[in-house]
Image (cartoon, rainbow, N blue to C red):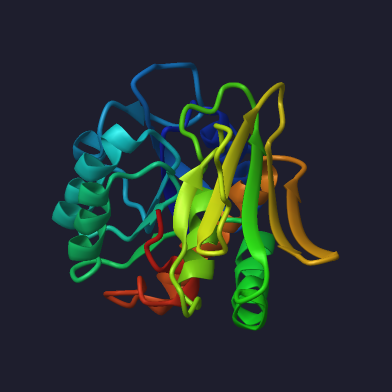
Amino acid sequence: MLNIIVNGCFGRMGQELQEEINSREDLTLVAGIDRTTEDTAFPVYQSLAEVNEKADVVIDFSHESSVATLVDQCVQKQLPVVIATTGLSEETKQKLNEASRTIPLFYSANMSLGINVLIEALQKVTPALEEDFNIEIVEKHHNKKKDAPSGTALLLADSINNVSQTKKEYVFGREGKENENPLNEMGIHAVRGGTIPGEHTVIYAGNDEVLEFKHTALSRGIFANGALKAAEFIQKKRSRNVLNERITTIKR
């Protein structure tokens, strides 16, 4: 049995995570953390510091502004933590690195299995194509998403740059009449509308041929499921630093 605390339990992903946990007999939601309160079958607190329930792991789907404090409190309580919140600042990412030397900590800008397999594919094809192909990324999300471009788009861009012989300069959208669009630029374009859970397309465009890699999230359930797999992973591994695993390497 895995006992879980959910930070941001009343947010969209927090509620999705509740459903996933409640559907499984081997998982228990022992406490939630949120700024608001609702009637629930589990106790809800304002911060992890107030939680006295025994837990095996904390899963965070909250807001960037609360992540640093949560991680500090996880270190104090020696609790493993899965950080699934996106849009983290460089300062917060550095704090994750420091905390990972003390507690098991898993972080990815995207928890879906498909995205992480996509990263593997991009890193295999990029070295063969980068000299002759422009590379562009288009990401689409719902109209409630605050950050742009998405953390996943930047994760994909970084994964490409990590294996590129000539590092790409990121161009966030394109405008103007004098653009030269050289091969050493990588355009990253954000679309916001409706209820799109998430769609990412990586385009390799050469002379007379185009290769596209596309991932579409049809529901938020894939992210909740991925976060639970991450929680199970660090609980079984009990490593003090799992940030060096490929899926958990800190990306933007």
Q: Residue at x 27, y 58 (%)?
A: 79
Q: Do we see residue 227 in this rendering?
A: no
Asked where in the image residue 251 lies, by quadrant, the reply is: bottom left
Q: Residue at x 52, y 35 (%)?
A: 14
Relative placement, left or right, of 183 versus 216 is: left
Asked where in the image residue 43 lies, by quadrant, the reply is: top left
Where 81 sits versus 243, above or below?
Answer: above
Residue 136 at x, y percent in the picture: 63, 54
Where 95 sits versus 208, above or below?
Answer: above
Q: Residue furthest left?
A: 76
Residue closer to the observer: 76 or 249: 249
Q: Residue furthest front?
A: 178
Residue closer to the observer: 200 or 103: 200
Residue closer to the observer: 188 or 92: 188
Where 155 sits versus 131, above or below?
Answer: above
Residue 216 at x, y percent in the picture: 75, 48
Relative placement, left or right, of 233 versus 131 is: left
Q: Do we see residue 85 in this rendering?
A: yes
Residue closer to the observer: 27 or 65: 65
Residue 141 at x, y percent in the picture: 64, 34
Q: Residue at x 71, y 21 (%)?
A: 194
Q: Residue at x 55, y 59 (%)?
A: 182
How many numbered discs sit on the rendered protein? 0
Residue 148 at x, y percent in the picture: 49, 35
